[in-house]
Image: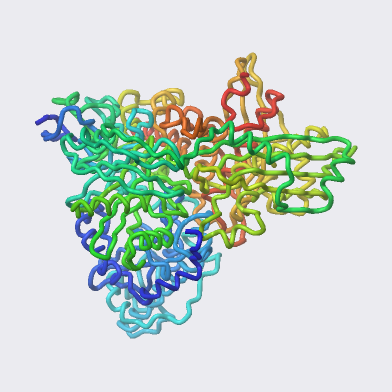
Amino acid sequence: MIKLNLNGKDHEFDAPGEMPLLWALRDVAGLTGTKYGCGMALCGACTVHVDGQPTRACVTPLAAVAGKQVVTIEGVAGQPAGKAVQEAWRKLDVVQCGYCQSGQIMAASALLSANKNPSDTDIDSAMSGNLCRCATYVRIRAAIHEAARSLA
Amino acid sequence: MAELHFPDETAATGGIRNFSRRAFLRGTGGLALGIYFAPLLGRGSLAGAAGDFEPNAFLRIGSDGLVTVIAKHVEMGQGSYTGLATLVAEELDADWGRVRVEGAPANTELYKNLAFGLQGTGGSSAIANSFEQMRKAGASARAMLVAAAAEQWRVPAEQIGVRQGVVEHAASGRKAGFGELAEAAARQALPADVKLKEPKDFGLIGRQTLPRTDSPDKTDGSAVFTQDIHLPDMLVAVPLHPPRFGASPAKVDASKARALPDVVAVVEYPGDEHRFAGVAVLARNTWAAIRGRDALQVEWDESKAFRLGSAEILARYRDLAGQPGKVARDEGDAGGALERAARRIDAEFEFPYLAHAAMEPLNCVVRLDEGRCEIWNGEQWQSGDQRLVAQLLGIAPEHVSITQLYAGGSFGRRANPHSDYVLEAVSIARAARDQGLKGPVKMVWPRENDTRGGHYRPLFLHRASLGLDEEGRLTAWQHRLVGQSFMQGTPFESVMLKDGIDKVAVEGVDNLAYAVPNLRVELHLAQDIGVPTQWWRSVGHTHTAYAAETLIDEAAQAAGKDPYQYRRALLDRQPRHLGVLDLAAEKAGWTSALPPGAQGERRGRGIAVHESFGSFVAQVVEVTLKPDHSYTVDRVVCAVDCGVAINPDVIRAQMEGGIGFALSAAMHSAITLKDGVVEQSNFHDFQVLRLNEMPRVEVHIVPSAEAPSGVGEPGVPPLAPALANALFAASGKRIRRLPIGKQLQA
């Protein structure tokens, strides 16, 4: 049993410690909002927060997050930045296919939690690890600025 | 499979004539899924309840007043769910906030794409083919709601109005929501004919911002993609594919895989020239299946494997390009005019294979039962998949049900004319069933399988010669293309291949918009190249627009003319091309100088215009060339004419996204083969655009009363040539091989 705090609640995983957090979340806990895209930390679709840090769940063993606080897209609305980012995403209709957007929202909300007023350069460096094949990048940038304004 | 002729054979599904959608779902167990997933979906179940008003196959109104639009086209990002719902809601006068969308089941008769006669999504046709059909669906439902109110209130129907989901009789002050009238409306006669609104009365169509129907569930993690389906007793299957196309397993040692925890079975399954044979590991979770796949030891039978590399394929194409091909277009005497030309431009272009590389790697869920098959998929090609699955299993097509889920991107890949990955999933499920495993199977391709999975945008070689007279006027254009056809051996062959010419291999150059008195276009279709190929967002235009729009730029340069004005002069009989070209040039400030860059930097601006799928797009690209000859793409100004603009914000989004998608291919992406093995595997070596490389984008829509045309693809073709023209302006170098990569630094 591996114990951790998942979206604000204590959770026990009956799964091997070397199982990547991504598959533990999706296949064991049934939280399918966190997505599989590459399995090698190249695309960011699996981004979650571990103790507040944006983390690629596909290369993070479950054992490595024992005792830590894990937040996924299903729980991010519980944080002010997460809620603001989701609302900005809806206001600007950022999504297209939507598959990468959980990871985008998690990366953006981690950025805003750490930096209340990010510049375009800050956004570029925080978000360039999150691929979007629909190339919703223009609106991702705009929505992060929008969320920052709403948090100010 | 070459004997398939869908348009005639769909009559074979006549058994499901008059099958109601509900009965169809019930008959195939679809309702069970609705119940199972209801908590997950959270925003309405997959099938209706008693008391619902279901006037036609395209919408349902519940007693709660919720309007559910049944989308015959998949939502893979291009906004089709929002667009289809807009059309229905417009004529229904529904409250947009109370409109939901769900995917239609596979039923060619009810849900065929009116552009092809088969159920499927592609060719940027979703909204264009549905424009009248969906509005009529909404208008007839509205008429029945009004008739129900008239009956209940004993007033003439003509005195009843509908606004934002409320039916109202102003004179008596009576009002009712759609939900209150649903049951009574269901008893009304279907109107024989309905009158559609005049464009001046549109309230939703053309509104600048109308929230997408899929924004809420795609921002909170609740949207359900194929990857997210989890059914009782389901196993996850991860396949091991052969390293070369055409190979199959010869000797399989699965002992190590079987010994792993949670691995349940290992199955071998056959393929053919269009789909992989392979070995799949079935496990209780995805990670166990991936580990099992990694533990397989397989020797491959490569007696039929394809063994050429990209360099050898190109060498063959070069040989072919030196010989006359089949003639696709012949106006005047291009050869003679070239001999008489004062100046000539001769160019050869190379375009690589390209993977679609959608963010959701290919996958498919299959449940087999006696004589029946259920599929859950980001389904783009229902008629084809239903038919080929039925054929593989030896069952009737109507016994194959398909639940159309969101697709996490596709760019054409999920509409495979040979149903490659769907048949592979069915083959695995069948092999598992033969081992006594009767539960559903979710086949998941890991990213490396997706990258190496074939069905690429084909590699193309072009050789072109342009002739100019003393005044710089374009007098001759000779263009020869070499590449594979992906229409051969498909149901489309009879329509798309005529006299050795594949329409989609030459589209965009055989119908060149520029007034050239002598034009000759020839094509060689390469045979015996064992790399499967397929349409890829904007299809033939991905390479023809690049060649044509960089060549016309070279002609302008040779003539000493401004590239925008040179195009204008050759487009004087093409008003819609001119419309977007002028708008893009004006908004980009073409006639004023570009602001200079920093010390040592050079700026450049390029333009291109192209028609595809009935829509017209022009783009102006601005770049900065750095002292080390790397470059940044700073700004793209885009003008689009797609007829009536139904959802302007979706149109803008598709132009932005099309530009970003095209930038990936122009700047970075290539699939290359060495000795028949694909050299790329994941996003580190198949590189795509990242956020830090995305330019500012400004989109301008030409006001139009023409019939609506698509926007999913037409934003793609002009970008790469406009970029190359901008880089020429900055560097003086012409780029004739994509991707651009580091060619400017060489």
Q: Between B177 and B349, which is closer to the camera in this rendering?
A: B349
Left or right: residue B97 compared with residue B498: left
Q: Where residue B3 sits: x, y (%)?
A: 50, 63
Number of labels in the image equals 0
The residue at the point 27 percent across, 48 percent down is B442
- Which quadrant would residue B85 be assigned to in this image? bottom left
Name which quarter of the figure residue A85 lies in.
Answer: top left
- The residue lying furthest to the left in this view is A1
Q: How is the image coloured?
A: rainbow
Residue A77 % position (x, y): 26, 38
Left or right? Give the position of A17 relative to B13: left
Q: Nearer the viewer, residue B97 or B566?
A: B566
In this view of the protein, can residue B130 be seen by the observer?
Answer: no
Counting from the top left corner in percent of width and height, residue B380 is at 42, 55
Residue B734 vertical position relative to residue B254 in the rendered view, above or below: above
B127 with respect to A66 (left or right): right
Where is the C terminus of chain B found, in terms of image quarters? top right
- In this view, the residue in front, B78 or A88, is B78
Residue at image position (42%, 45%) is: B409
Out of B95 and B694, give the one closest to the viewer. Answer: B694
Q: Is residue B418 above or below residue B567?
A: below
Relative height, residue A19 to residue B239 (above, below): above
Asked if residue A25 can be seen in this view, the reply is: yes
Residue B243 is situated, as x and y percent measured from the top left of the image, at: 41, 35
Q: Residue at x 84, y 50 (%)?
A: B333
